[in-house]
Image: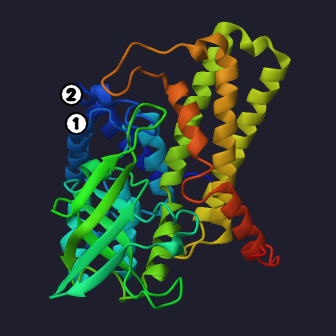
Amino acid sequence: MDLELTQEQLSFRAEVRAWLAENLTGRFESLKGRGGPGDEHYAVDLRMDWNRVMGAAGWNCIGWPKQHGGRAVPLMEEVIFNEEYVRAGGPGRIGHIGETLLGPTLIHFGSAAQQQKYLPGIVDGSEIWCQGYSEPNAGSDLANIQTTAELKDGKWVIHGQKIWTSLAPWADYCFVLCRTDKSAQKHKGISYLLVPMRQPGITIVPIEQITGGSEFAEVFFDGATTDEDNVVGAVNDGWRVAMGTLAFERGASTLAQQQQFQKEFDLVVAAAKRNGASKDPVLRQRIADAWIGLKIMRLNALRTLSVDSTELGREASFAKLYWSNWHRDFGELAMEVLGAESELALPPAEHGPYELTTLQKSFLFARSDTIYAGTNQIQRNIIGERALGLPREPR
């Protein structure tokens, strides 16, 4: 990947910057820097309105093919957009699961009818998606899912439970991994279903996090249904489709996440200068090391993204392990730089018994970074077995 921007790319950056500066104002001004990890409950209705405004202006799904509603911009333009969005203080993208996970999956694996039915609502920002993968006994061992779907009279009837379902309380649809052949081997007999969330037979129980919010939820399916043709790919071939979705998860939006890390880093540097922590030689060295790690992270992400693939490669596993450990350790550094200030909470907020600062939320939420989307232990196994060719872990 060529990291030198062309004149066209510089013009695109200026276009993005100008639109965000013009539109993140007025009633959307209060959204700046809000709605990210640990802050998901903030102004949900207003963020949904913002999602629709972005859709109307053509800023949702800009990397998608034009025939599916996108702009078909090259990868570097996607990177530019995501970085400028965070730099401008754009709020957490409430439609990101549809845009970065479900949408690309349907484009690559879905039928024409599924694409025509579900993609427009993601592009215009009117429909929100959540992901039904993990279960109480099927997290890192995702193939152990027990949620079932049985075909009856042209409908899939679903029974089971999903957990850690991001945005479930607000989602219109969920893509759900279900076991459709109980007699098949572990990774077989699984289907990838598109399920409406607003129907009888679905119960959503929010899970309160240490940050005071409830981004995640348990979702119980007790006879919920979806149409027979809402299977992505072939029946019982859902594992292949699910792995494709996970590959898309390591897309250009990871650069937006790293730009958010940069903003957190800038807050730590400002705090160190303000309270004198910058004069501590040990903390100064740790801050410098964090900066180096952040730059390495960006370059590795760009290198990974330059490989066009719908399979979850070894580079993606390495990247996840790297950034999650960096962010967890950085959160600890931030609290040490803040010192006694890190122990102070703000007055009670709308959600939870207290309000937290950006760095406090980051520190607490980062404890989960090394767990969700593949635990450290699982990532190391994948790297050892698939990248290095080491013998499989003893069973």
237 relative to 121 in the view: left or right: right
* Circle 1: residue type: Leu
Q: Secondary structure at mark 2?
A: helix
Instruction: Name the quadrant of the C terminus.
Output: bottom right
Which residue occupies 31% across, 54% down? 60
Residue furthest out toward the top: 275
* Circle 2: residue type: Arg
Residue 360: quadrant of the picture = top right
Q: Secondary structure at mark 1?
A: helix
State the count of labels.
Answer: 2
Residue 206: quadrant of the picture = top left
Percent across and percent down for residue 234 are 36, 89
- From mark 2 to mark 1, how far is it between C-alphas? 8 Å
- Decide: is 338 above or below 15: above
Percent across and percent down for residue 189 are 44, 87
Q: Which residue is mark 2?
A: 27
Which residue occupies 38% across, 76% down? 178
Residue 123 visible to an observer of this rendering: no
Q: Nearer the viewer, mark 2 or mark 1?
A: 1
Which residue occupies 54% across, 40% down? 259
Percent across and percent down for residue 291 are 71, 35
Which badge, 2 or 1, comes first in the chain's sequence?
2
Q: Which residue is mark 1?
A: 46
Q: Which mark is residue 237?
A: none
Residue 131 visible to an observer of this rendering: yes
**Residue closer to the observer: 72 or 376:** 376
130 relative to 332 in the view: left or right: left
Instruction: Name the quadrant of the N terminus.
Output: bottom right
Residue 272: quadrant of the picture = top right
Asked whether the residues under the numbered discs 2 and 1 touch, taking CB atoms below 8 Å apart as contact, a structural biologist would say yes
